[in-house]
Amino acid sequence: VAQSAEFGDMEAVALLEAAGRAILPRSPASAAEWLTAAWRLLRVPDRTALERQTLLYPLSVALGVRGRADEALTILGFGPCHHMSEVMAKEEQKRLWRALAKGAAPDWNELFSGYKSCMDWPSAYYWPDLIKAYPDARVILTWRSPESWWESFEKTILAGIGQIEDQDALGLTLIASQVFAGRPHDRAHAIAVYEANVAAVVATVPRERLLVHRLGDGWEPLVAPLGVPVPGAADTNRT
């Protein structure tokens, strides 16, 4: 469909969008490919901003997580892994996390029902509470240079935030308003928030529970502290 459709073909756009949204929790890489194709078919003058907006946020989520730690944790046997893609795909998850972002008392067992691990927003914002609620859980801090982090954040999550019209969306109520205090577009401020969070995790989480995994480290530094073997070639090629 992506190869044969012409610009403005709304039937093809609808098909690609539905397929991308459906597969997003299981395969962000495939979702990113199909949503990108749908986005390109919309890039003609008569398409409205709303039509583009409905695609941009799930696309930014897919681009942000494809081949990343949530898939790695699932491969290693710690899945299903909770991620923003789960919230995007499931109405009950959306309802629960939106309520929490607005101040509802957390019921972590309900929020993470059916999951063995969690990664990324929205759960990462609540790490100080989660390390107390799950005292036996290991904590993985994925680290990259601040400049590299900003480059990725700007192209994915920040791009999506700028297009959100739903005022209850977590991109606004949690990420923009709470994580970045209403200043997600301020590069210096956002990087300072990122660096402060890294420092707080390192200073707070007991050393025996914390694994700092740097971008590009590969499988070995990840699997050894978790007590699991390096996965086979078929799985390593996925990430």
Image (cartoon, rainbow, N blue to C red):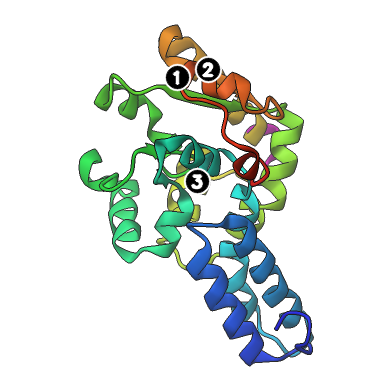
Q: Secondary structure at mark 3?
A: helix
Whether 229 is drawn above or below 162: the answer is above
- Cα–Cα span, label 2 and label 3: 32 Å
What is the three-letter code of the residue carrying label 2?
Ala
What is the three-letter code of the residue carrying label 3?
Ile
Q: Which residue is mark 2?
A: 224
Whether 176 is drawn above or below 117: the answer is below
Residue 217: x and y in percent read 68, 24
Q: Which residue is mark 1?
A: 227
Q: Which residue is painted at 45% across and 41% down in the image?
A: 178
Whether 217 is drawn above or below 186: the answer is above
Instruction: Check disc 3: other Cα within 10 Å, few if <14, some if 14-19, many if 20+.
Output: many
Between discs 1 and 3, the one toward the N terminus: 3
Q: Secondary structure at mark 2?
A: helix
Instruction: Check disc 1: other Cα within 10 Å, few if <14, some if 14-19, many if 20+.
Output: few
Which quarter of the rendering shows the C terminus? top right
Position of 57 compared to 76: left or right? right
Residue 160: x and y in percent read 61, 59
Determine which quarter of the picture holds residue 61: bottom right
Q: Which residue is mark 3?
A: 175
Pointer 2 and pointer 1: residues touching (CB < 8 Å)?
A: yes
Whether 62 is drawn above or below 91: the answer is above
Instruction: Check disc 2: other Cα within 10 Å, few if <14, some if 14-19, many if 20+.
Output: few
User: As rendered, which of 220 and 92 lies closer to the eye?
Assistant: 220
Q: Which residues are magenta?
A: 185-189
Q: Which residue is painted at 33% across and 65% down in the image?
A: 91
